[in-house]
Image: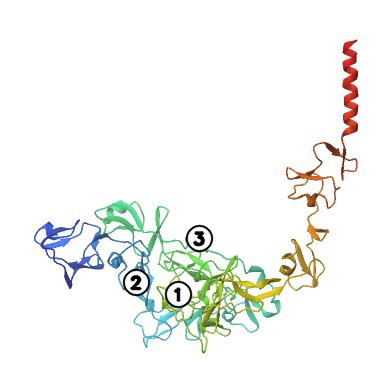
Amino acid sequence: MAGFRLILPIFIGVILTSDTILTSVIECETDGDCIDDATCTDNLCQCPEGFVFSLDGYQCLRHSIGYQSECEDDAQCSYLMGRHYCNSGVCDCDTGYRYLHGRCVIAKGLGESCTRDEECHVSNYFDAMICSDENICVCNEGYYARGDYDCRPEVTEINGNCALDMDCMMDDAFCDIYQCTAITTRGARIESKSNVSETRTDIATYVVGASCATSADCSDVLNSVCSPLTKECVCRRGYFLSGSSCIGELGTDVGCTQNSDCPITPRLCRNGACVCPTTHYHNAALTGCLRVAYTPDFPCVQDLSCHIFGEQALCVDRGFERFCSCPLGYALNEETYLCEGTDGEVCDTGACVVSSDCSIVNAVCINGLCGCDETDRLEENTCLPNVGGACDANTRICDIENADCVDDVCSCDEGFTGVDDTTCMQVSAGLYDSCEYDIQCSFVVADSECVNGQCQCASTFTEKDGACLQAKAYGDYCVNLQQCQVLLGDNIQCRNSICQCPADMVRSSDGLSCRDDAPTLKASTILIVAFIIYLIQ
């Protein structure tokens, strides 16, 4: 590659339809002056059609078409325009920008300066904010300001859709299961907490695939065009590929007139565009809606469900389910229902690459954010281990009553058991001993529970010799001998996982025990002997 010359930071602009693509200028006299795969044309090195120089000019990489398309270099994402970059292997909009219908556009918050309506966007409602005549982002008509954070829809009728109590503008009304309800009927809210609704949240695709010279070659697929970058048919900006069709992204004016015209569920057509209802937020790619939380302990599937409490809110694991939670150094403001910084605590939610970037002691970097490990808790700006968490004698001390650090694990002392993440309680002495929690009983006697302050066998189990056994009838499935002998006789066996008699015994007439098979055998023997004598005669 003799004579290879990379000139930076000089750029030239190549005009392609409405897009301006910047590419590094690499001068040349022959193909040998260029990198592999590039050719010398008009004394400039050029990558093959559909490819672009990497930012350092040492590779020809394929153009990435669309939001969240795969990439390895920022230069591949130039299709998005605006400020974009390759984020963890996919094209994304840079900080301070958001994706909107094929482009990265600047994002301004409530009260910030603006030049056009599309810049004003914090919450997931397309028309919630507008750019005022004074060039300030303000709430649109029909929306109210929630603190200085965002604009939420005003609900003025009972049974109108809502997500937070404050959405209901009527006196003595609250938001119950996503509907404004009179305060006198409060009580059913808990029943729908697990009703998590999710539609399209997968990564969108935009490339139809057929090669083309002009957009006329793409006429078989409605709303597709010929990409000047790759010379293949792609969905036009503001559309994405669904099956074999290019359908409009949420908020794109597709000319819908009724809800059934919208392919993305929950179907809602507003002013010619398909949008998410008040009870849902759209994903970043504008290809799907996700139901939002309406209580802080709402079960969730991803962070987006929790962003009604602010973009800092997270969907975190708690046992076998995930719930919305404010991150380290933040607490929920009960008036605005937003995660806000806690006075006197470190607000450690900034971006991180490695755990050492986090200022809170023992914090770990998870998905680019600082947080305590799932087996830890936050106390005075330090992540400390819960029962079962990793511990040591230095910064990760096992600071729980009746617990110690044993073999680098924060464990309850002998004779104690963990009833929650931070509490060790003394185990019971057996059945009928006093208790507060089921685990105090079941730790000693399997299948027992705490009933009215006393350890007892669970409802479907029966006590026998200090143990709780599930009573089995003759012929029932069993796992041990004791289960069969709760109701049946001592000579019943658990044989081949079935409560039954031994092979040399038969079931008694009452069906509860077994008897010797000898009488039957004796009679059979007499008959056989008599038959042999008969044959001899």
Secondary structure found at label 2: strand
Dot 3 crowding, Cα within 10 Å, few <14, some 14–19, many 20+: some
Q: Please report contact status of discs 3 and 1: CB closer than 8 Å, yes or no.
A: no
Q: Residue at x 90, y 40 (%)?
A: 509
Q: Is residue 422 left or right of residue 532?
A: left
Q: Please report contact status of discs 1 and 2: CB closer than 8 Å, yes or no.
A: no
Query: Which kind of residue does numbered mark 2 sit on?
Result: Cys
Q: Which residue is mark 3?
A: 260
* Looking at the image, residue 28 lies above or below residue 479: below
Residue 239, horizontal then vertical, whole percent: 38, 62
Distance, label 1 to label 2, CA atoms, is: 23 Å
Query: Which kind of residue does numbered mark 3 sit on?
Result: Ser
Q: Which residue is mark 1?
A: 369
Label 1 vs 2, first from the N-terminus = 2
In the drawing, what numbered circle is on residue 125?
none
Q: Which residue is mark 2?
A: 104
Q: Quadrant of residue 405?
A: bottom right
Query: Which kind of residue does numbered mark 1 sit on?
Result: Leu
**Mark in front: 3 vs 2:** 2
Dot 1 crowding, Cα within 10 Å, few <14, some 14–19, many 20+: many
* Looking at the image, residue 60 lies above or below residue 409: above
Could you say which is closer to the camera, residue 422 or residue 146? 422
**Mark in front: 1 vs 2:** 1
Distance, label 3 to label 2, CA atoms, is: 30 Å
| Quarter of the figure that contains the N terminus | bottom left
Q: Is residue 458 left or right of residue 534?
A: left
Residue 235, horizontal then vertical, whole percent: 35, 59
